[in-house]
Image (cartoon, rainbow, N blue to C red):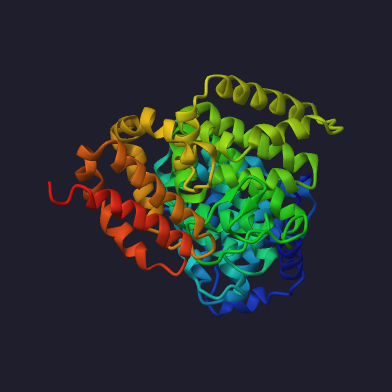
Amino acid sequence: MSLEPPTYLGSLQNNIRARPIPWEGAVRAGNITDDQLKKIKAVDKVRKDARRQTIEGDLKGYVTLLSGGSDGKSVLDSASRRTDILQYILVLANDLINDVPSLASSLIAHPDPYRPFLPLLRHSTNAEDPIPLLTSTFLTTLVSTSLVSSTKPAARDEEALPELYGYLSTLTKNQDSGLQDIGVQDFSALLRTKRSREIFWSHRKETVEPLIAILRSAAGVKEGGSSSTTLVGSNSIRNIEPGVTGGVGLQLLYRILLVLWQLSFEGSLVGEDLQEDYEIVQLYTQLLRLSPKEKTTRLLLATLGNLFSSNRTTLLPVAVFVRLPALLTNLSGRHLTDPDLLEDLSSLSTMLDEYTKTQTTFDQYAAEVQSGHLRWSPPHRNPAFWKENARRILDEANGALPKKLAEILSKRWDNDKQVLAIGCHDLGNLVKEVPERRQQLEKLGLKTRVMELMADSDESVRWESLRAVGEWLRYTFE
């Protein structure tokens, strides 16, 4: 799938290029200088080879025209009161650095090349204002060039990226799919280095969360009730709506998957939090079921492969719990032709096969708890399981499983009360088998929470919480 400029942006740029600008009047009014106008006219509305020859003959002059310097102000500073000129120059500047790569290289050699542009990202909060949008387009092109121009991160990019990511995130949060598409494509252009990906992740509330929200819509996931709701297997306590991409355009879906694939190359940094905060394994498993094209399937598999490779102990158990191995077997039976997809599918299947061969019943239970969702799987109602594993559940990884149970039970689960019933059931078994460790559970607030659930509206929750409290009461008068 090619990544041509979004239609909305191309249309806007063409409209601005076609507008007549009263340049001589602007010079008389002091909005631009005569020298600036001469440089503009020398490269505006001319053939690319003539444009390249003119600029390469005066690189220093054109760097000053756009970014300012000791030889003069930037034309953006001069024309700051003329929005028509600002828009025109921003479109022209983007054309120039695309047509003349040596100009982009000279600009990033400037001591402060982004200075006239960054304030324009804050020109207005109106999504219809072309100036921030056109500025972000120019800066994305220039910053992405800068990022790969050196093996060491540059201070200019460290300063610009947070501001640029911040503006682009306003586009991805917009309800207009055209603006979303621009924001996502610009994100992708910027995620070219380890450092740019790290900065992107450090601002994930702004950058990643809106993309995950769009993917949830594509998966047919309706947000309702508790924010902790989770996709599990072929069912979810959120409602799964029919349809291939849930109203999300295929091009936008592909580009978002591309961004998260780029991010997944920092798997050791992002993997655990992607699962903890966004339930990425469950979401991607559901998207794999619905994937409309081989190219989207390939990106889903490649991203999971990157994340699993660097987070085996935390993510592979969740993948098994949500039945990803069975889904991969189903995919293997389809007539797939993309060689990269087939390679990723084989690699992922092998990784999961090797993991499942070593899995114990305890591992299955731990994976279920760590997934953030509980179902009545066999271990819960097996007395032998609790006799053999209760103490290990309390001790494993410094008590990580009881902490996760506390987190699960702290949520309302309005759409899936069964989770609360199962959690109470498990706590009752822990207290029954290892009564001397009650205080560990009480410190996590679990006794208080179970007592609260005795008044829950759901009968199964009331019953299981009553049984759990009963195990605690056995030792009240010791």
Quarter of image, res 224: bottom right
Quick check: 93 left or right of 143? right
- Reply above or below: 300 against 96: above
Which of 269/188 is in front? 269
Residue under the image location 74 percent in, 66 percent down: 17
- Reply above or below: 145 against 177: above
Which of 294/35 is in front? 294
Quarter of image, res 192: top right
Residue under the image location 36 percent in, 68 percent down: 455
Q: Position of residue 74 (x, y in %)?
A: 50, 60
Which of 336/10 is in front? 336
Q: Position of residue 442 (x, y in %)?
A: 23, 50
Residue under the image location 65 percent in, 27 percent down: 348
Which of 284/142 is in front? 284
Q: Position of residue 173 (x, y in %)?
A: 57, 64
- Reply above or below: 191 against 120: above
Q: Quadrant of the N terminus?
A: top right
Residue under the image location 49 percent in, 24 percent down: 360
Q: Position of residue 456 (x, y in %)?
A: 40, 67
**Residue 110 appears anywhere in the view:** no
